Each structure stands twice: as structure tokens, then as C-alpha cells.
Amino acid sequence: MVILYYPLRLLLFLIGALPVSCAARLGRFFGAIAWCIDKRHRQVTIDNLRLVFGKELSEAQIRALAFENYKRVVEAYFSAICTLQMSEEALQKYMTLTGVENIPPQNDPNYGVSRVGLIGHFGNFELYAKNSAKLQGLQFATTYRGLDNKLGDRLLETLRSKSNCLFFERRREGAALKKAMVSQPLLVGLLADQHPGDRGIWLPFMGIECLCSTSPAVFALRYNCPIIPAFCYRRAPGRWKIVIDKTIHSKVNGKPRSIREIMVEVNAAYERAIRQDPANWFWPHRRWKSYYKRLENQKKENAHEPPQP
């Protein structure tokens, strides 16, 4: 990795030096190449789209959507290399932010000083970290899991250090995050749209029952916060729009809601964003892994059941 570190830095510099629209189109070109050679993730993408849209779209439409999604994913990565190296001021001609008025004011008596931001793998999702100046006095922050490879982690830190976002490593900086949540007005962006591993609760996600992360609800209840959904939509190569959706409240009439209640609304917000532009979301991930595992276990159980007399 030491040998690759400086060539990678050079490559990131060269991509970052391109006009954003050129980097985006270059990403689409390499996305088409990736589609041809990456059979495993290509099939995951098609299977996911077939599971969700199989009753709404033809097979040809599903494959066309999967191909466009592949190009969009790589386009987003190439674009992010550019936008991470730009100032918030320079970014304004490439993106817009709407719905700021949906954020509950700081003097809302129902909540504490911080807010939970519900974000996801939509468009150029690194842009979330570049809008602190427009968030009504809130400092944007997020959590991340550091790479096991120290040089790779250092490379990411170099890129992300150009934003005004606060980054907290989940395994090492939990105490620092807890302190910051109650001592300064943060908007902590949490990505809860992917498979949560063995943790979470069973809920419908895009109409399919599967394990879902509860982190937005847990954070909101623990730190007395509302949840602010914000999603990045791609408008054209190198152009984006971040939309802040309606608030998901963690309390009703001053009383905390259940985690399940909150997460039903969280998943509904994700579904609205995905359906608005299906190619804009990250489909190559095995989001419904728990669904398939449950089906497999049920088949095994049925196979071992004695036949009915």
C-alpha cells in the first residue's frame, strides 16, 4: 500500500483538477466498463431491482435501470473527488439546497440543541458535509468507520479535511461525539439505508421485510432530537440538488415515540427519495441480505417438517 499511496494521491489530484462535469462524464465512462467486468455486483444490482420493481417494470427496463445506476455510482465517486476539494463558496454553482425552513428552530422547547440528519447513499452523498454555512447555525457532523489500512484511512482524511464537517470514528470517538451532541448545536448525519449486519429490527424497506438499522431513532431519543431527512438528487452530470424533507419527530405531545414508530417513518422517507429517482440510489449493495437468509432458513425448516397425515 505504501507503493500505491503517492500514485493514488496523484490520481486523485488529477481527477480533482478536472471540471466537475468532465469528472462526472469520465466516471460514467468507467461505470460502463465496470458494468461489463464486475459480474458479481452487476448481478446484485439486477437482483435488488427485480425484487423491488419486478411487478412494476419489465425485465428490459430493470436491466436498463441497473446499467444507468452502475454509471451513476461511479459518476458520483469521481464527482466527489472534485467536490471534496472545493470550498463551500465554489460549490454553489454546482448545487442547490432547499427545505432549510423544515429544520425546527434552535429555540424549539421540545428538543435539545442538536439535530439528527437522516442521509443516505443518494447521488454525490459527500456533499452533505459541505453545507454547514446554510444550516441555521448547526454544525454538520457525521460518523464513520476508519479503514483498517492506515494509509488508505489517511488518504480519505486528506480529502475530507477540506470540508467544514466534523468526523467521529465510531469505534474510538464515541465519548467525544456524546459530549459534542449536548454541548454544541450539531446536525449529525446518519446513513441508515444499508444492511445493518446482525443488528436492527425487522421492518418493510421498499416493501420488503428485512433488518433495518435503528440508529436514527436511537440517537434522536437519546439526545432529545428531531430527525431531519436530507437527500442528494443528481440533476445532470456535475449538478446536484439537496432537498431537506419534512421533519420526523421523536416525540408526540412531549412524549417519546417508540423506536419502531420512528423507523417506519424513516423508511418511508427513504422510499420516497428512492422512488423519485431510482437510479440515484446505491443498488449494488446486498440490502436485502437478511430477507434472503430468512427465506433460506424457512425452506430448511419446511424441509425437515414431517409430512402431514
Image: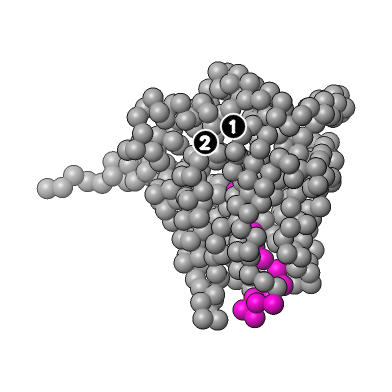
Say what secondary structure mark 2 lies in. Answer: helix
Left-right relation of 41 to 105: left
Count of marks placed on residues: 2
Pinpoint residue 85: horizontal percent, then vertical percent.
82, 39
> Which residue is under mark 2?
279
Circle 2 Cα neighbour tier, 10 Å, few/some/many (<14 / 14–19 / ≥20): many
Say what secondary structure mark 1 lies in. Answer: helix
Query: Is residue 257 within the magenta segment?
Result: no
Residue 62 badge: none
In the image, which residues are magenta? 107-121
| Residues under numbered marks 1 and 2 in contact, where contact means CB atoms less than 8 Å apart | yes
> Which residue is under mark 1?
72
Left-right relation of 184 to 204: right
Q: Amino acid at mark 2?
A: Ala
Quarter of the rendering occupied by the N terminus: top right
Pinpoint residue 250: horizontal percent, then vertical percent.
55, 71
